[in-house]
Amino acid sequence: MEKKLLALLDAAKTGCAALERAAGETAAAWKLRWRKAQLEGELDCYLTEVGQLLYATHTGAPSDSGEMEHLLQEADKVRAALRENRRELALLRGVVVCDGCCAENAVENRYCQECGEKLWP
Ligand SMILES: [Zn+2]
């Protein structure tokens, strides 16, 4: 009887640890998805401004090229952050996304199995 009780307690402890681990992973994934939505919103804003400047040029109101360059550089930074975010989300699922072709690879691969791109720095 005592043995059964101890086995039951062990099973409960194992179950609790698994639940805590799952909750931790879910919270991390939720934060990354939230950040992804923020970054996508920022990228939309920059690209909308780029489009407005470009259209202003078309309609005869040339825009400041320095402003355009600044917007494009900011958009590049946000896209790099989105790539990193995608990589972190994939790692939570146990895969690595290739920057070259977007294929998912096993974490232990050093090179992409689709295109041969280096997966890890
Ligand atoms: Zn690839």
Image: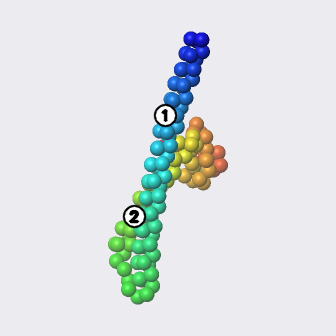
Q: Residue at x 62, y 50 (%)?
A: 103
Residue 5, given in percent of the width and then of the height, sits at 56, 16
Q: Amino acid at mark 2?
A: Gln
Query: Secondary structure beneath disc 2?
Result: helix
Q: Is residue 7 left or right of residue 53?
A: right
Q: Is residue 15 left or right of residue 69?
A: right
Q: Residue at x 49, y 46 (%)?
A: 29
Is residue 82 shown above or below 119?
below
Residue 24, given in percent of the width and then of the height, sits at 47, 38
Foreground: disc 1 or disc 2: 1
Q: Residues within 10 Å of mark 1 (few under 14, many from 20)?
A: few
Is residue 5 shown above or below 16?
above
Residue 119 visible? The answer is: no
Is residue 33 shown above or below 54?
above
Is ligand 1 within 8 Å of the beta carbon of the residue shown at mark 2?
no
Between 11 and 50, the one nearer to me in the picture = 11
Q: Residue at x 61, y 40 (%)?
A: 106
Q: Residue at x 43, y 87 (%)?
A: 59
Closer to the N terminus: mark 1 or mark 2? 1
The quadrant of the rendering that contains the N terminus is top right
Q: Residues within 10 Å of mark 2 (few under 14, many from 20)?
A: few
Residue lying furthest right in this view? 114
Between 120 and 45, the one nearer to me in the picture = 45
Q: Amino acid at mark 1?
A: Glu
Q: Which residue is mark 2?
A: 73
Residue lying furthest top in this view? 2
